[in-house]
Image: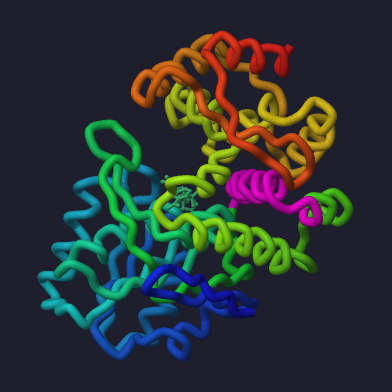
Amino acid sequence: MKMTVHLPGEEYDILAGHGMAARAGEVLALNRRVLVVTDDGVPPAYAARVCEDCAHPVPVCLPAGEASKSMDGFATLLRAMTDAGFTRTDAVVAVGGGVVGDLSGFAASCYMRGVDFYNIPTTLLSQVDSSVGGKTAINFAGIKNIVGSFYQPKRVLIDPDLLDTLPPRQFSNGMAEIVKMAMTSDAGLLSLLEEEGVGPGNLLTVICRALDIKRKVVEQDEKESGLRRILNFGHTLGHGIESAEGLTDLLHGECVALGMIPMTAPALRERLCALLARFGLPTRYTGDLDRALAAVVHDKKKSGDELHYVYVSAPGQCEIRHASVPEFSAMVREAFV
Ligand SMILES: NC(=O)c1ccc[n+]([C@@H]2O[C@H](COP(=O)([O-])OP(=O)(O)OC[C@H]3O[C@@H](n4cnc5c(N)ncnc54)[C@H](O)[C@@H]3O)[C@@H](O)[C@H]2O)c1
């Protein structure tokens, strides 16, 4: 299946299908120097297969984990390209999750002011979310995604077969983003998830439905000045929980899952929680809610007086709402009593 992302002045294709990664040589322009970036948590065969199709592959394998999305990781990629004599016409391919994708995209955007970037995402989260939209970044000075660029890939290859090796918790992590997109934008997808769940028979369909939502949002708001904020459903509180948990205990998707619950109309909350539970995501927050709310307020101080959040009022329908800190805190507490 092919989806085209149309942006002002450029467009690119997302090619999705079983076995798509093995077709990299056919559908990507690899007859040049190609930096093939992966991490040591991704099965090595995935990047090795891509290297086989490159005229001059330059493989780089980083340590798995968020710590690689750093100035050091960035320097490693730039060094590999300069050492191999990359020119403006060479390319970078990411074969990994959001960490590898965000870092590789950023390096591709900076090397000689931009070389071609292809993304072959290998986690569910990166297949439905981070690989599309052109947000690239590294973490710096202890702040997540603080240095980065908008830089669109030339092509994205989505292969659900790569997810066969993904640990179940990482799969659930990606499901949180799919539920998020269904809740805000696609009542039909929400019903499909409730009726069928997700399995080998419909995984590609579910991924493509979620990707299509992301594509449409990005097309209407490439630089995140308006509509794209709906992708932040569950993230205002979710980020607070993430900070309170110290980035290690709960995965991002698990924090987003919890963050969606209070921001959903009470009549719909039961359905949301049933779906989250079905996909192995938490529905009760057992951590320190005061700390999480304090972290939300800390974020708020940087951005103004009121908290802005995405609220889902009915399946597939959402709006941006504003609240004072006490109002927001009361809403969260009420949902978790
Ligand atoms: N650019 C964006 O728009 C955007 C959107 C959402 C998230 N992000 C970023 O994405 C990152 C998180 O991405 P993620 O959730 O993919 O995490 P990740 O890249 O850290 O991958 C999670 C783990 O899964 C392993 N892994 C990857 N593919 C595998 C496979 N097929 N089989 C077995 N193991 C595999 C990795 O080695 C890693 O240990 C964060 O840095 C976040 O900021 C970016």
Residue 187 on the magenta segment:
yes
Q: Which residue ends up furthest to the right in the rendered image?
A: 195
Residue 93 location (% of width, % of height): 36, 71
Q: Residue, x 37% and y 26% (percent of image)?
A: 303
Q: Is the magenta stretch mostly helix, strand or loop?
A: helix
In this view, the residue in front, 317 or 281, is: 317
Does 63 sit above or below residue 258? below
In which quadrant of the rendered image does the C terminus lie? top right
Residue 185 location (% of width, % of height): 69, 50
Q: Residue, x 24% and y 73% (percent of image)?
A: 115
Picture quadrant where residue 275 is located: top right
Q: Residue, x 66% and y 62% (percent of image)?
A: 207
Judged left or right of residue 177, residue 273 is: right
Does 146 sit above or below residue 103? above
In which quadrant of the rendered image does the N terminus lie? bottom right
In this view, the residue in front, 286 or 322, is: 322
Q: Give the range drawn in magenta.
A: 167-189
Judged left or right of residue 278, residue 231 is: left
Does 213 sit above or below residue 304? below
Picture quadrant where residue 62 is located: bottom left
Residue 19 location (% of width, % of height): 60, 79
In this view, the residue in front, 174 or 268, is: 268
